[in-house]
Amino acid sequence: MEIFPPWDGVEDLDRYRMRMRHHEKQQRIERLKRTKMAQAVDQDGNPLYKISSGGNLRRARKIPARVREFVLERDQHACTECGASDFLELHHIVRYIDGGPDTPANLQTLCTTCHGKKGGMACESGRSSPSSGDQRTSAT
Ligand SMILES: [Zn+2]
C-alpha cells in the first residue's frame, strides 16, 4: 500500500489532513473493489454490492419493506435464537452473496449478537425504531 507523504510543515495543516483523509478513503475503496463481495454478481450479472461514496460496501439490493415487516411480524419482533427484542436484523439463511433471495422463507430475525455468531456481518436492519437510517451496512 502506498504511504501518504508526511506533512511538509508548509502546507496548511487542515488542508493536509483533508488530503490525507481523501487519500485513505480512495485506498479503502481500491481495497474494497478487489474483495470477493464487491465482485459478486447475481444471475443477471448485476453487482450484489456497491461501494458508497463514503467508502463502505453496501448491498445493492434491499429487502423490500413489506417483506421485512412480514418477517419481523412472523418472528414476533424477537431474535429467533435468544429471544432478544433489541437490535434486530434479518439474517439470510442462504447467504445473500450465494444468491439467497429476499423471501420470508430465506429470512430469519436475529439480534446483532446472534447474527454475529452466525458469521453475519451487520445486515439490513430490521429494527423497528426509525433511527437506523444510514449506518454502514453490508450483508450476510
Ligand atoms: Zn439473539
Image (cartoon, grey):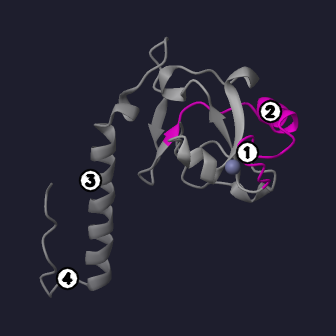
Q: Is mark 4 within 8 Å of ligand 1?
A: no
Q: Which residue in the protein does label 2 denote?
A: 71
Q: Earlier in the sequence, mark 1 or mark 4?
A: 4
Write the start and end of the magenta stretch as one range.
58-85
Q: Are marks 1 and 3 in contact (CB under 8 Å)?
A: no
- The answer to whether the residue labelled 2 contacts the one labelled 3, judged by CB atoms less than 8 Å apart, is no
Q: Is residue 4 above or below residue 46?
A: below
Q: Residues within 10 Å of mark 1 (few under 14, many from 20)?
A: many
Is residue 74 covered in magenta? yes
Locate residue 101, reporting x and y percent.
Answer: 63, 21
Mark pair 3, 4: CA separation = 22 Å
Residue 92 sits inside the magenta stretch: no
**Which residue is the site of mark 3?**
27
Mark 1 to mark 4: distance in Å? 46 Å
Neighbor class of circle 3 (other Cα within 10 Å; few <14, some 14-19, many 20+) is some
Amino acid carrying mark 3 in the image: Gln
Residue that sits furthest to the top in the current view:
43
- Which of discs 1 and 3 lies nearer the camera? The answer is 1
Q: Answer whether labels 3 and 4 touch (C-beta < 8 Å).
A: no
Looking at the rendered structure, which numbered label has been put on residue 126? 1
Q: Nearer the viewer, mark 2 or mark 3?
A: 2
Residue 32 appears in the picture as rendered: yes
Instruction: Classify residue 69 as left or right of residue 95.
Output: right
| Mark closest to the chain's N terminus, 2 or 4 | 4
Going 25% across and 84% down the picture, which residue do you hit? 12
Helix, strand or loop status at disc 1:
loop
Q: What amino acid is labelled 2 in the image?
A: Val
Residue denoted by label 4 = 11
Tell me, yes or no, whether the two marked residues, 1 and 4, touch with CB atoms within 8 Å. Answer: no
Question: In the rendered view, would you say 8 is above or below 49?
Answer: below
